[in-house]
Amino acid sequence: MTTVRLLLCSLVYLSSTNLHAFCGFYVAKADTKIFNQASKVVMVRDDDRTVLTLANDFQGDARDFAVVIPVPAVLEKDQIHVGENALIDHLDAYSAPRLVEYWDADPCTPPMPSMMMKQSAPTGGAADGERAEALGVKIEAQYTVGEYDIVILSAEQSNGLETWLRENGYKIPPGASNVLDSYIKQNLRFFVARVNLQEKEKLGFTYLRPLQMAYESSKFMLPIRLGTVNANGPQELFVFALSRQGRVETTNYRTVKLNSDLEVPLFVRDDFSHFYRSMFDRAVQREDMRVVFLEYAWDMGWCDPCAAEPLSNEELRKLGVFWIEDTESASAKAGINRAIPRPYAGTNVFITRFHLRYDSAHFPEDLAFQQTGDRTNFQGRYILRHPWTGEAKCEAARAYLKSLDARYRTEAENLASLTGWDIQEIYKKMNFQPTNGNKKWWQKIWQ
Amino acid sequence: METSPIYKLDGGNASDVAQSRSALLSNCRIGRSPILWLQQTWIRNRCAADHVDVNHCGAVQLLLASLTRTNSALDVRSALITGLSLCLLLRTNIIWCAVVAAAVAILSKFVFRFRGKHLFNPANIGLVTLLLAGPRVAWCSAGQWGSTIVLTFFLVCLGLLVVHRARRADISFAFLVGYALLLFGRSAWLGEPWTIPWHRLQSGALLLFAFFMISDPRSTPNSWVGRLIFAWLVVLGTGFVQFGLNRPNGLFFSLALVSFLVPLIDLLFPAVRYEWALATDTPGAANRSISPNPPTS
């Protein structure tokens, strides 16, 4: 079976120019591509309105691709759209954990102030309405949007729905029936999409574009239970939430900020992705895989440092940020020119990036969210500090060089603590031998 | 970097909190109360708004007590419980909102009264007022407690200790049993695995609500039958908000709404009213000061 990925996109507002290197010079980012089989979902939410963008990096034969997503309402054709992968990639790059670097100044100079469900070969062709009715399944709507054939289903019981899906070429994993049943009783509908090969050929895309849907519902949640039914071990999920008022958080799981703003050895620069993967593995292990990690929370108007430029208004609108137009017309009326970049200016779009590793044992229920008024910025940021390498001509420089030993040790300890890597190996990679590194604490007292 | 202050999430001014704590200690004479211990252990690293809530509750209580010429020396302890509940549940980025919540909570005790009883639990009405203003103003992070067994066990023990002294364990247990039945019953109907209701029950906010909020003897029915009915009505209301309206914080909204029915329940099931006892000034008396007295009115 082939795994299918989901991507939900969020909104961003206002572009900005390069900002000062106040938080360090940006070196590298750890985007979602370093995690195998990671699903990505972007949620745009304000009041009861939601726009979801589901992208996937499905690599197999397009005819094997299918998704079944529980949705709270029957969607009309206008509520479904096919978006662009580039938008999600941009949002991912903008919000990714980042590596920054600083260079120490000459110490002798005074300082300056400063659901996928995978599916197998569909048989093609729309389901017969009468057969569906006999199974207690109602085809609420049926559309072709872009390269996708979409069916919105409601059902009376899971057995009928399961049978209908199987008869129409969808491979339903064992155990899905119970989950489908609970969604049916909660009056959810099922958004079923698969690729229309003829349309795909006609459009000329060699990859699958993200599906988008807009709906109004009091349910602010993301169904993940179907995804765990057929999973081969824990799955990786990135959720990008774009909201108007502030940070989004999960209400039924703890949201934990990732360890951030720590200094690490310079060699991390050469393999930031490896470092980040190891760090995330360890963080998951520490929290017993029961929390949702916060990787980024920021006003979309700016970044510091920028792993990628903030998304433009145009990109945000395409992702579904429906309130941007209102803001722009209000600005136009007020005579405000938004074309002028406003570094550090706040906007009315706030991004929250979540990263979780989940399975049914540790995440038994679907993710539920709420919007908060908290606009405190947070980013996953790791720091490289290049030492000053000049000649020690003054007392300050000699003291500085002496202090480097403790700093290198701290950097190594940070890295070992973050990733679980062996500290001796780290010292070796740093070409550094701590003078007291191997001594016990009592051996250092009377040295 | 330009960041806005966050009250409740990050570390705060420890010395201010310590000052607040010592002031409360001397003012309230509650000695080694488990509530104070809760404050010391849980709130130590939290922010300035915490002691705004706690101190403000105390200040408003004393002010209103003197204005209404009520002998409320002991009620400062009640204000302390209210302040601590707000500290643990309410989150806001706007410091004056914490003050408003505390003021609303304590004011409600003086304004919304029926036959000498409070109509609302003070912390609950303060919290609900702010939540109704929307997430821009304040929110409640019920999910941020985590669900470890250790924390659950800790809070259960602590809660039991407190409610035992206030003789209102019946309502806490009635509520928890009713809520558990609701969650397990709903999951059974939906065909969900038991891990789902179990996960929902392992919530610190739920236990805090059950043992420190709904158990308030001054705003709950006088008779035990009335209290059972009250607790189960709160359960039904919670289920309606949570699963019918799909909104968070169903516990708090439900309690505020069901509180309107307390006078009616008291009418149908009359019993003697609960009174907080006044402490004497004898050493050691402070720790025994919360106990039921014969009705005074």
Image: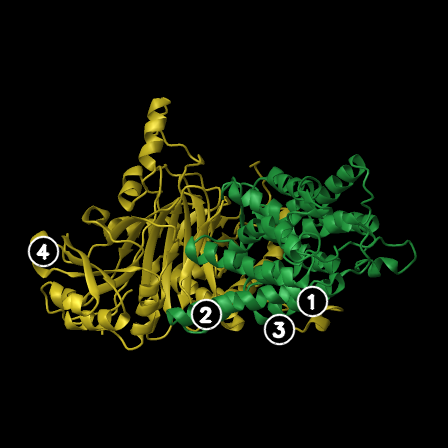
Chain colours: A yellow, B green
Residue A249 x, y percent position in the rendering = 46, 53
Mark before the other along the chain sequence, 2 or 1: 1
Residue drawn at (80%, 45%), measured in percent from left and top? B72
Q: Residues within 10 Å of mark 3 (few under 14, many from 20)?
A: few
Residue A199 circle label: 4
Both on one chain, marks 3 and 4? yes
SS class, disc 1: helix
Q: Tell me, for residue B160, which label it has, or none.
A: 1
User: Would residue A263 be seen by someone viewing this image from the given angle?
Assistant: no
Q: CA distance from mark 2 to mark 1?
A: 26 Å
Badge 2 is on which residue? Answer: B185
Q: Are marks 2 and 4 in contact (CB under 8 Å)?
A: no
Taking the image as drawn, is residue B283 in sight?
A: yes
Inter-mark Cα distance, 3 to 1: 49 Å
* Quarter of the figure with residue A38: bottom left
- Give the residue pinned by disc 3: A438
Q: Could you say whether the residue bearing mark 3 is in a helix, strand or loop?
A: loop
Q: Quadrant of the N terminus of chain A?
A: bottom left
Residue B37 marker: none
Q: How far from the left and from the top, in percent, is residue A37?
A: 31, 67
Mark whose residue sits in front, 4 or 1: 1
Q: As rendered, which of B129 and A10 lies closer to the eye?
A: B129
Separation (CA) of disc 3 from disc 2: 59 Å
SS state under label 4: helix
| Mark 4 neighbour density, 10 Å: few (under 14) some (14–19) many (20 or more) | some
